[in-house]
Every structure is written in C-alpha cells, then in structure tokens.
Amino acid sequence: MRCYLHAFLLCMIFTFFSLLYVCNQLASTLEEGDDWSLREQGTLDRSAHDSGHPLRKRPGLAGLRDREGLDRCKSGSVSYWNPYWRLPADVCGVNCLLESPLRVKSGSAVTEHSDGRSHLAVVACGPRLEETLTMLKSAVLLSKKPLHFYIFAEDELHDSFRNALDAWPRTVQTKFNFTIYPITFPKENAKEWKKLFKPCASQRLFLPLILKEVDSLLYVDTDILFLRPVEDIWALLSQFNSSQLAAMAPEHEEPRIGWYNRFARHPYYGKTGINSGVMLMNMTRLREKSFKNDMTTVALQWKEILMPLLQKYKLNITWGDQDLLNIIFHHNPESLYVFPCQWNYRPDHCIYGSNCQQAEHEGVFILHGNRGVYHDNKQPAFRAVYEAIQKHPFGESMETSLLFPLEASLQTTTNSYCGRASHLFTKKLKQSIASVQQDTTLRR
Ligand SMILES: *[C@@H]1O[C@H](CO)[C@@H](O)[C@H](O)[C@H]1NC(C)=O
Ligand SMILES: *[C@@H]1O[C@H](CO)[C@@H](O)[C@H](O)[C@H]1NC(C)=O
Ligand SMILES: *[C@@H]1O[C@H](CO)[C@@H](O)[C@H](O)[C@H]1NC(C)=O
Ligand SMILES: *[C@@H]1O[C@H](CO)[C@@H](O)[C@H](O)[C@H]1NC(C)=O
C-alpha cells in the first residue's frame, strides 16, 4: 500500500512539473516574435503625463498590473532584451509564467505617428539633470504642437525628473506627456557600451530597438537648446526620400579644422563626418533596413550590426557611438538626410570666426553647447543663452523676461568670436517668441 502511495505521489510531482514546463513553453512561444523582440510591459511610471504612452490605451493591462503584484518589476523599467540581452535582476523575468501571456503583443507594431506630436528622446546620466530640464523647457516654451518626451536616465535621477516636470505649471503640462526609462544595455557587453564615450551616450544607438512601437524620434543630447519649435525639425521627416531614414548635421563646415578628415582612423560620412547630437530617426525604416558594411558580405540589420561594429573598431574610435554612426552611414550614404548646420550649431561654428553660412542668413535654430560651454566661461555667448532660458519663469512674458535680458547679456560677450556672431543666436528665437506670444493672445 505504501508503495502505491509513493508511486502516486511521484506521478503527481512529475505531472506537476510537466504541466509547468508545457505552460512555460506555451507562454514563451506566445510572446516570441523574434529573438530580439522586446517586451514592453507598460510603463510603470504612473505620472499623470505618461498616459500618452501607447500601452496605456490597452484596456485591462493597467488594472491587471496593479492587482497582481507585477509591480515587482522595477519601477519605470519597461524594456529589456531577450535572449541576447539578459534582464536586469529586478525587471520581470523571461519566465514569469503569469506575466508572459499578459504581455502586449503589438499587432500593429507601430503606432503614434502622424498624430501631430513630436517625439523627443534624451539620455541623461550623471550631473545632467538641470541641463536636460533646461533643454526640455526650451522645447515646451517654443513649440505650439504637443510633445512626447522619452527620458532615459540613470535610476537615481528618475524621481528628480518626475518631480521637476510635475512641478511645472498646469498650462505648460498640457503641452507634453513624458515617459521615463532606465538605461539598458546588452548584458554581455554592458561595461563596454557604458564606457564608450560619455556614460550612457551609446544608449541612443539602441533607441530603435527599445522603443519598438515608436515610428519616429528626434534624439538630442542634453546640451541642446531649441530656439525654434520642435515641430519644425520634426517636419523634416516628411522630406525624406524613400531611402533616407535618419538625419544629422555635418560635424564640421570647415575641413581645415575638421576632426574626422584630419584624425579619424575609421571610415566616416562625407567630407567631414556627421554630428549625432541632434538626430532625427525614422525608426520604422531603421528597423527594416539592411545595412551594407565592411564586416560581412551580407547586409546586416540594425540589431545585428552594432556589436560586430564595436568589436571591429573599438580600438580606433574616439567619439564613441557617433563614430559608429559615421561608419554605418559611410557605407550607406543614401540613407542619410543631411540638414544644415543651423539645426545643430556648436562652438566650432564660430570659435575661429563664423563658418555656418545658413545660420548667417536665417539665424541659429538649435544651439548645441558641447564641451561643457554652458557651465564654464570659455564661450560666454553660449552660456548666456542657457542661463536666460533656465532663469525664465514660466508664465511670464518671454519677450521681457527671456529675450531682453538675453540680448543685454550677449552685449557683454562681444570680445569673443562667438559673441560677435551672437545676433545669430537671437535671430530665430525672436521670431519664435513673437509667434508663440501671438498664438497665446489669439487664444485668449
Ligand atoms: C497626453 O496623454 C493624454 C492621454 O492619452 C492625451 O489625452 C493628451 O492629449 C496627451 N497630451 C499631449 C500633449 O500629447
Ligand atoms: C517612416 O517610414 C515609414 C515607412 O516608410 C512611413 O510609413 C512613416 O510614415 C514614416 N514616418 C514619418 C514620420 O515620416
Ligand atoms: C585602426 O587604425 C590603424 C592605424 O591607423 C589601421 O592600421 C587599422 O587598419 C585600423 N583598423 C580598422 C579596423 O580600420
Ligand atoms: C535620397 O537622397 C539621397 C541624398 O541626396 C540620395 O543619395 C539617394 O539616392 C536618394 N534616394 C532616392 C531613392 O532617390
């Protein structure tokens, strides 16, 4: 009798584990798109603003998530790699039996385009909080169309971002939604990616793979300031011809002071290379395209090309992921739309005399204070613009509390070349401000 009981128990145990296994397999096939398929689980950022996220619109998910303790998923974490890129320990696991069937399978993979919104992404690490907020502020101040911010930040910064943006006035908050994401890297090479260039900067290369449901994105560095509405650069997306999928400005206008043409030990785009600080991407196309390259005879997809490229060139690259982008577009020049320097205006454009012709005519559209010029005294004209935008109190007239003080402080910078070109900094800004103010008076 004891014998039967034992056999029965063993059977039960065996059945239980078989069932578990079958369920598990079932769950993973259910969600398996391709190996790289990225599971978004709905942002756990519950800020009132993130409701614009596509997942919010799916009924039921939010409720289930709240009920069933799925909250152990790291707050704010939404995406991860599998199996190539393993999960961080505190993000929901691959074999979360319960969760897998609930996971959203995106039938109509890409949503959210041509909805009139501009989608703006930034990656912020280390001491870049204030600078990033100032960039976002310049975007909401001058844009008339709604915005969605995708903020990738180190975990320590998440609360500060959320609190700061929540503290902006209601009237400003109606102009944007935001989602905060953790920095995620391929596990195997996380260290290598992170130390490449500034901390976290190479995150931008992975945006098309992380934000799988987003059609297009404007990526900007934290040290960018918009001097005209975001929707104006966004509109360039519709000018892409059928082979173009990304847009950037040249790294230099003047080959004599160009970096790539003088020093690079790898291929680069065009005459002087491209700068990735302001980058428009049609990510739908990026994800579909097969890129010619100098590693294999077959063309590689975006998700396949990055690591081999890093392996091949890691000893030869200086500017990290920007160099990788240069290599990719060197081999695929038909895929790049090059916009003029006034969309990514840097100290290089004025440091030895003004060399950005388009800015001479139309003014600067987007200011890029690279090499820390907003925070030291090397380029006071750049710093003046940063401080004017940072100090402007929301709600007050931009003319009297931003433009006029800025013009006054630019007057004091004329002992530098960039200071002498600084009327170009306010040329477009003046029009943008007038246009926003006119808009608000009309609506009153
Ligand atoms: C933010 O999301 C809400 C809810 O989806 C939506 O009604 C609103 O229009 C969005 N705002 C912007 C500026 O996109
Ligand atoms: C991006 O490209 C896809 C595929 O060609 C297209 O359907 C979509 O409209 C483009 N997005 C934008 C914003 O132009
Ligand atoms: C790296 O630079 C060295 C020295 O210029 C060059 O010989 C080598 O071919 C480069 N490596 C690659 C992969 O281009
Ligand atoms: C798109 O424009 C680029 C740059 O001018 C060009 O190299 C490419 O051939 C064009 N593609 C098509 C399909 O016309």
Image: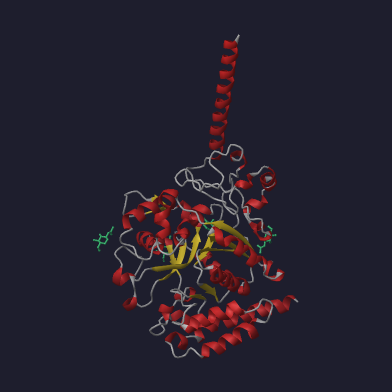
388 relative to 32, above or below: below
The quadrant of the picture occupied by the N terminus is: top right
Tell which residue pokes out farthest to the front in this image: 2
Left or right: where 79 falls relative to 271: right
Color theme of the render: secondary structure
Q: Is residue 186 visible?
A: yes
Left or right: where 108 falls relative to 291: right
Where's residue 438, x and y in %? 68, 80
176 relative to 418, above or below: above
| Res 441 quadrant in image | bottom right
Q: How many numbered marks appear?
A: 0
Q: Nearer the viewer, residue 332 or 365?
A: 365
412 relative to 325, above or below: below
Q: Nearer the viewer, residue 409 or 431?
A: 409
For image coordinates 55% across by 26% down, the residue present is 17
Quarter, ligand 4: bottom left
| Res 231 quadrant in image | bottom right
Tell which residue pokes out farthest to the top in this image: 1
Where's residue 426, x and y in %? 54, 83
The quadrant of the picture occupied by the C terminus is: bottom right
Where's residue 367, x and y in %? 50, 76
Where's residue 256, x and y in %? 31, 78
Tell which residue pokes out farthest to the right in this image: 444
Q: Is residue 176 visible?
A: no
